[in-house]
Image (spheres, helix red, strand yellow):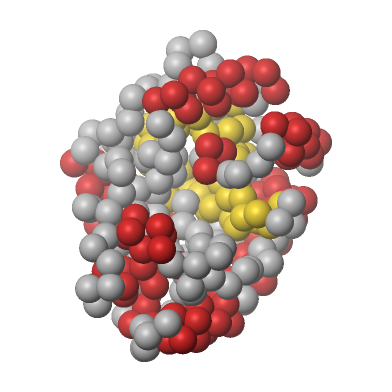
Amino acid sequence: MTGNIDLHCHSSVSDGMLSPAALVARARANGVDVLALTDHDEIGGLAAAASTAAELGLRFVPGVEISVTWAGETVHIVGLQVDPGCPALVQGLEDTRSGRERRGRDMAAQLAAVGIPGAFEGALKHVGNPRLISRTHFARFLVESGVCANVQEVFDNYMVEGKPGYAPMRWAALADAVGWIRAAGGRAVIAHPGRYDYTPLQFDALYDEFIGLGGEGIEVVTGSHTPEQYREYAAVAQRYGLLASRGSDFHGPGESRVDLGQLPPLPSHLKPVWHDWH
């Protein structure tokens, strides 16, 4: 399979800005040939995205991005080519989403304590469903309210460990996330590894456990990586025999570092995650 392949993006069903249909239309306009929608812990947008992709002649890959707690940090595992009707995946994602509202109220209480009232209600305006509320929705509220100039400034000053608005969340176990993806017939991929603050020994342990559970891939070229990290994680993929993936991690116009389909291609010496898709 060839062409412009983007296997990581988000719609308004999780924390993206565009509806699934509008997201697919933007991808097509940007020259994307193959697109995966990978909303956080949610597959509710896949049907609409697939329908629009069929209308526009774009190949669609059903996906999801599952939040995992590993060694005290949050790691994201992307599932590609998943069956959205798989009972294990559906129930697992429901269980994972169930703690978001509680964490959101804890975050809002902390923000109120430093003089920013109404954050929970303000964040809800950007999501609609308390069970899907995330830090990104709070960040948009803080920008809209004039507390910060942009989303990056929010995450420099709020809602990260040691800053106002931080509330820890216990996500799924790595074994659970990979298991749900495999049960749904999908391929598990570690998303944007350059974002995780692990030591080399911890990374080795993460990769070893992931591979032992049946995980197969790692994102190399992603909107969350620098060009130097493209090279770094290309070497990681080779060292561990992992398939390589490419995805913009697009959330919305003017908010994401990279637009849909605008990344450079994967290094030619890597085996892509889509190597056996026909």
| In this picture, residue 178 sits left or right of residue 35 | right
Q: Is residue 171 above or below residue 211?
A: below
In the rendering, at what x and y percent does residue 104 appear?
Answer: 51, 78
Query: Residue visible at 62% across and 23% down?
Result: 236
Query: Residue visible at 60% across and 40% down?
Result: 190
The answer to whether residue 183 shows anywhere in this view is: no
| In this picture, residue 17 sits left or right of residue 98 | left
| In this picture, residue 215 sits left or right of residue 53 | right
Q: Nearer the viewer, residue 64 or 191?
A: 191
Please count the marks in the image.
0
Q: Nearer the viewer, residue 118 or 69?
A: 118
In the rendering, at what x and y percent does residue 131 appear?
Answer: 52, 78
Res 47 quadrant in image = bottom left
The answer to whether residue 88 shows anywhere in this view is: yes
Res 128 quadrant in image = bottom left
Query: Residue visible at 65% across and 54% down?
Result: 73
In the rendering, at what x and y percent does residue 185 appear?
Answer: 65, 45
Locate the N terminus by quadrant.
top left
| Residue at the left extreme of this rendering | 29
Res 102 quadrant in image = bottom right
Query: Residue visible at 36% across and 83% down?
Result: 116
Q: Nearer the viewer, residue 19 or 134?
A: 134
